Image: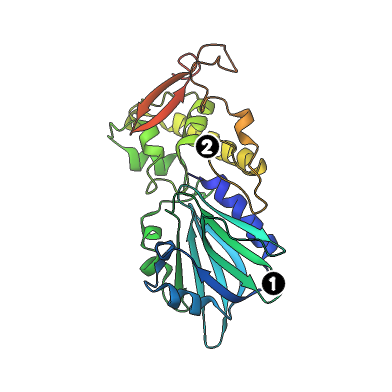
Amino acid sequence: MPELPEVETVRRGLEQRTPGFRIQRVVVHRPRAVASPGDPQAFCAALEGCTVQGWSRRGKYLIGQLAADRGHGGHWGVHLRMTGQFLWLEAPRPACTHTRVQIWNTLGQELRFVDTRSFGQMWFVPQGQALEAVITGLARLGPEPFDPVFAAPYLRERLRGSSRPIKNALLDQSLVAGVGNIYADEALFAAGIRPHTPSGRLANGRLTELRNALVTVLEISIGAGGTTFSDFRDLTGTNGNYGGVASVYRRGGQPCRTCGTPIRRDRLAGRSTHWCPTCQR
């Protein structure tokens, strides 16, 4: 599943390609891709005639701001889920089997949403309505990793007395938004913390190290355009480059890049967890 760096890469691509994108026509090929409104035809009608003003990101959600036109406007929410991706097309191209939504502007350019496993979703939020009232998952999100609030005191308070492994805690979107399996493993390695460590036992100093490591890992991955490990593609259909420099993720049995110890692969919270028995304590 795309995580924060991949979603941020898509946001930046949309921000670059779609300023002033006036939506002329929308076609929904798979109704389940539209979460709200329930009628895909109403979703198409709401977007058609609007102009995209910009894009923001909250956790793994993309939020497009739509300028009012024909008496309506609002926001266009998107969650890529496991395999959703946007493609930018300058010229007509036949829709593939996994095309879920097609959006054309007045110049004939197309923004296409392709989703192999069909878990991705879109929402239209009318102007004046709270995003969280329609895209209910937003209300459950914790702070962004880059938010000053996300620091040792916050983590200490939230994790106080918890026996939950710190790896599991990092995957909790109500604790920190946007982090998934890849970057939780990478951040814990960078901070030298074993993923099985009960989260409530981490002192302020170690929590600060973890917070700083997570931010650094995410910044590096954003700079690399995301990872090659998932089905993620940017708007041009290109993988990210982070996978080639990952320290532990998907390197089970291979030597640690720091000490040479074979990387362990365990299961935590039902997810594969990669870590170095020597470097992480």
Q: Residue at x 45, y 15 (%)?
A: 277
Residue at disc 2, secondary structure: helix
Q: Which residue is mark 1?
A: 108
Q: Residues within 10 Å of mark 2 (few under 14, many from 20)?
A: many
Q: Which residue is mark 2?
A: 214
Q: Quadrant of residue 238?
A: top right
Left or right of 159, for residue 236: right
How far from the left and from the top, in percent, is residue 39? Answer: 39, 74
How far from the left and from the top, in percent, is residue 101? Answer: 52, 64
Above or below residue 116? Residue 271 is above
Q: Quadrant of the C terminus?
A: top left
How far from the left and from the top, in percent, is residue 31? Answer: 41, 66
Work out whether mark 1 precedes mark 2 in sequence or the reverse, and give the earlier one.
1
Above or below residue 198? Residue 42 is below
Q: Quadrant of residue 126?
A: bottom left
Q: Indicate the amino acid at tag 1.
A: Gly
Above or below residue 21? Residue 95 is above
Q: Indicate the amino acid at tag 2.
A: Leu
Left or right of 100, for residue 174: left
Q: Residues within 10 Å of mark 1 (few under 14, many from 20)?
A: some
Checking the image for residue 82, the label placed there is: none
